[in-house]
């Protein structure tokens, strides 16, 4: 007679090694998911501090006769460097957002496993109490422009870069007037 404990699980309600693995995996993935959210928020706060630097320097060292498009070289370089750093931070935040979506999909996959296990065991309470999705293809990677930080980057970064370009053009035309 074969040993029942070494073969497939005869009783579907018994917790298996796979169930234990999935629970541990769920906890690990959920923790990483929330850590990524915290990192995204921290990165966004850093970006807001970064974009405030040129405006602060402009306010502190402003000469009453200075125009926004006739800045000193230091301010010109500062606006250019901050615009480039802001764009790089934007790309980093997009990468973090993709990681968040990947982890969300993984968590949904683990939930899907437990949904299937609940159906196998005849546990109807699981479906009644479940509010979070179990679809491994959600959320979509293409979220469009409905994220608030996307709009902030689209407004502030290019405007700083435009100030840099406009000042450079004005400085170049002023130099050509002398020759």
Image: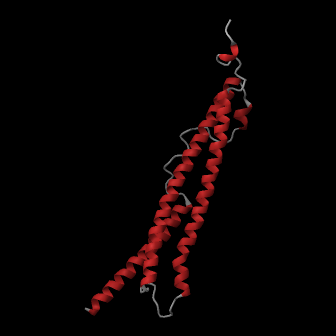
Q: Quadrant of residue 81?
A: bottom left
Toward the top, the furthest residue is 1
Q: Would residue 67 be seen by someone viewing this image from the given angle?
A: yes
Q: Would residue 159 be seen by someone viewing this image from the given angle?
A: no
Question: Residue at the location (55% across, 58% down)?
Answer: 147
Q: Quadrant of residue 134?
A: top right
- Closer to the camera, 124 or 161? 161
Q: Quadrant of residue 158?
A: bottom left
Percent of width and height locating residue 99? 54, 49
- On screen, residue 122 above or below 31: above
Percent of width and height locating residue 139? 55, 45
Give the colouring mode of the picture: secondary structure
Percent of width and height locating residue 102? 54, 45
Q: What is the total number of numbered labels drawn onto the structure image?
A: 0
- On screen, residue 80 above or below 65: above
Relative to 84, 104 lies left or right: right
Relative to 3, 89 lies left or right: left
- Where is the N terminus found, in terms of image quarters? top right
Question: Residue at the location (56% across, 81% down)?
Answer: 56
Question: Residue at the location (68% across, 32% down)?
Answer: 20
Percent of width and height locating residue 70? 42, 87
- On screen, residue 116 above or below 56: above
- Where is the C terminus found, in terms of image quarters? bottom left
């Amino acid at each position: 007679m074969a040993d029942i404990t070494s073969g497939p699980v005869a009783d579907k309600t018994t917790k298996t090694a796979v169930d234990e693995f999935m629970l541990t995996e769920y906890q690990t993935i959920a923790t990483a998911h929330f850590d990524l959210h915290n990192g995204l928020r921290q990165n966004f706060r850093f970006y807001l501090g970064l974009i405030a630097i040129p405006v602060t320097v402009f306010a502190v060292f402003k000469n009453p006769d200075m125009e926004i498009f006739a800045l000193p070289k230091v301010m010109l370089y500062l606006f250019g460097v901050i615009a480039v750093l802001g764009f790089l931070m934007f790309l980093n935040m997009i990468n973090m957002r993709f990681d968040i979506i990947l982890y969300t999909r993984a968590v949904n996959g683990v939930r899907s496993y437990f949904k299937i296990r609940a159906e196998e065991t005849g546990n109807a309470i699981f479906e009644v109490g479940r509010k979070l999705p179990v679809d491994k293809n959600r959320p979509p990677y293409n979220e469009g422009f409905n994220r608030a930080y996307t709009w902030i980057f689209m407004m502030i970064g290019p405007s700083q870069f435009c100030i840099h370009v406009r000042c450079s053009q004005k400085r170049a035309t002023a130099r050509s007037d002398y020759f």
